Amino acid sequence: MIAFEVEVNKRKKVIGLNDIGVLSFSLIKLPESTNSIVKMYLGGYDVQNDLHFKWLDEDLMDGDEVSIKIHEGKYEASSPISVKPGEDDQEKLKRQIKYYYVLEKELKSKNLI
């Protein structure tokens, strides 16, 4: 198992997921018009069970300190703040059709189709 040990302003959060899954950590710069400067997200995906996990979804402010340590092997992981099932076949088809029309419009605007 891989675990990310994330510390925000000395507050520790340990995240882990079996090797069948994906862990994702991102820092996202938001527009200046928002209250926060950076959005921090930490999530995962269990491929075998088609489950999406979220451990962190926080706003970071000026002066916040973030550290990440990577651990391999057995490690006590914290519970996620949310677990959601993946898309069912109908939802997936709707999303793909919507994306198809977006691409079609873009290609038509460039006279490619």
Image: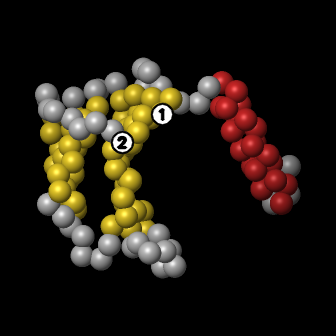
State the scheme by which the image is colored.
secondary structure
Query: What amino acid type should be assigned to the residue bearing mark 2?
Result: Ile
Kind of element beneath mark 2: loop
Q: Nearer the viewer, residue 21 or 77?
A: 77
- In the depicted structure, whether residue 1 falls above or below residue 3: above
Residues packed near mark 2 inside 10 Å, few (<14), some (14 to 19) or many (20 plus): few
- Residue at the spot 34% in from the left edge and 50% down from the top edge: 56
Is residue 112 among the parts visible in the rendering? no
Q: Which residue is mark 1?
A: 84
19 sits left or right of 70 in the view: right
Residue 47 percent coordinates (x, y):
43, 26
Q: Which residue is mark 2?
A: 81
Query: What amino acid type should be assigned to the residue bearing mark 1?
Result: Lys
Is residue 104 among the parts visible in the rendering? yes
Residue 19 percent coordinates (x, y):
29, 26
Q: Nearer the viewer, residue 106 or 53?
A: 53
- In the depicted structure, whether residue 36 falls above or below residue 2: below
Residue 87 percent coordinates (x, y):
59, 30
- In the depicted structure, whether residue 107 falls above or below residue 45: below
- Residue at the spot 47% in from the left edge and 69% down from the top edge: 30
- Residue at the spot 16% in from the left edge and 33% down from the top edge: 76
Residue 97 is tagged as none
Residue at the extreme bottom: 32
Kind of element beneath mark 1: strand
Q: Nearer the viewer, residue 91 or 83?
A: 83
54 sits left or right of 50 in the view: left
Residue at the extreme top: 48
